[in-house]
Image (spheres, rainbow, N blue to C red):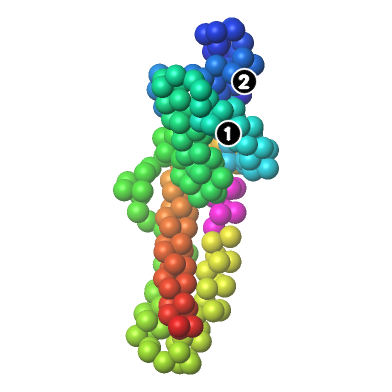
Amino acid sequence: MSLALACPECGSELATPLLCERCGTLLDPATPPTPFAVLGLEPTYALDLGAATKRVLALSRALHPDFHANAGDELRRRAQDNTAALNAAFQVLADDARRADWLVRDLGGPAEDQERAMPPAYLEEVLEWNEAIEEARGSAAADSPARARLAPLNERLEQERTKTLRRIAALLTPLPPRGSPALRSARQELNAVRYLDRALRELGELRLATRV
């Protein structure tokens, strides 16, 4: 992805707002770049994670503060700030749910506090899952039937999370137009992922307590 900007030192076209990869000049972005812009990528849900990882490693080497240890205070600050920006961008892009969340918001879709609903198909199952978790939490015996159901429930929720992410991928590939109804549907699916993640954390804590 071209930024259509040139390095102030050598005039080369920039692929990232963090540094010039031709002459090594560290840059100081006037505004915080998007996660995709940091890596020089076009916004997309169908991210090639392997290629993105290689890109991050290459930029990390060029930006690492140790590489600029003998530079002045300003350049060391830029190296530290840009390394932090690179790491933060990759954390968003490498996580399927966080990447989808960013894209939905960037395309004008609803935020979490604007659309709290989950897809209707989840409603009955959520009640069932919550009941199973509460029964296990209220059962002190490690060998109780309620505790024995934790492992298969955990597997079921993991499968549901995978299916939900596939639906999100279908909604966001290719990226829908700004303001598309698909963005609201994607937000509802993301709400389901958030619920599933919370339930899986609770299950993990309960299963750990059972082993102890």
Secondary element at image label 1: helix
Q: Residue at x 53, y 40 (%)?
A: 90
Magenta stretch contains residue 20? no
Q: Where is residue 102 in the image (x, y as percent from the top left)?
A: 46, 40
Q: Which amino acid does label 2 sit on?
A: Glu
Q: Where is residue 57 in the image (x, y as percent from the top left)?
A: 62, 36
Q: Going by the image, does 125 lie left or right of 40?
A: left
Q: What residue type is labelled 1?
A: Ser
Q: Which residue is drawn at 58% across and 41% down?
A: 45
Q: Mark 1 points at which residue?
A: 60
Residue range corresponding to the magenta coloring: 164-170
Secondary element at image label 2: loop
Q: Name the residue under label 2.
A: 21
Task: Classify 51 as above or below 160.
Answer: above
Task: Classify 115 as above or below 146.
Answer: above
Q: Where is residue 123 in the image (x, y as percent from the top left)?
A: 41, 67
